[in-house]
Image (cartoon, rainbow, N blue to C red):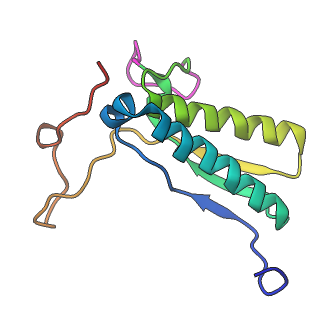
Amino acid sequence: LRGQVTISSVVHLAGLKAVGESVEKPHLYYDNNVLGSINLCKVMAEYDCKNLVFSSSATVYGDARSCPIKECHALSATSPYGRSKLIIEEMLRDTCSADPDWGVVILRYFNPVGAHPSGTRALQAAEHAPQQAT
């Protein structure tokens, strides 16, 4: 692709996302989520693409003691999945500090659920089996 196209921005939505699985297989989550993000940033820099939207997670807040959670709430992930997202966020902040040409937006999602199998509605909280870290 070098010289054929110019990539100005990347939206990074990739990553493993099951809290329970991350507790059982932490290395899988650090390898895929953290190392995958590092490799993505390296390739972006090679192509002089330094604009990134990163899909993080509200799990970086851990067990929040107040509701609603505000963006300034303390960060304290309680699972390998959450910690992988928090590590990536910190790496991206360090990247921006080291090179001000980088522009990064971090999106944190609350309560992601999938669609109902019928395709006619979203799953309700009671229908979605939560995956809690023990």
Give the position of the C terminus as an image quadrant.
top left
At horizontal 10% and vertical 65% (from top left) the residue drawn is 118
Along the viewing direction, whichever of 87 and 65 lies nearer the viewer = 87
Q: Position of residue 133 (x, y in %)?
A: 31, 23
Which of the 4 image quadrants contains residue 17? top left
Give percent across and percent down for residue 105.
Answer: 66, 48
Closer to the camera in the image, 129 or 21? 21
Q: Is residue 101 magenta?
A: no
Is residue 3 shown above or below 120? below
Name the quadrant of the N terminus.
bottom right
Magenta residues, start to end = 63-73
Q: Nearer the viewer, residue 91 or 56?
A: 91
Residue 115 vs 105, above or below: the answer is below
Q: At which x and y percent is residue 19?
A: 35, 34
Identity of the residue drawn at 33% across and 39% down: 111
Judged by its main secondary structure, the magenta piece is loop
For this view, does 40 lie left or right of residue 48? Answer: left
Can you say whether 113 is above or below 91 in the image? below
List the single residue furthest toward the bottom: 4
* Lateral position of residue 96 relative to residue 78, left or right: right
Classify 68 as above or below 15.
above
Residue lying at 72% horizontally and 41% vertically, measured from the top left: 92
| Quarter of image, res 49 | bottom right
- Quarter holding residue 127: top left
> Which residue is rendered at x = 44% and y = 42% of the image?
109
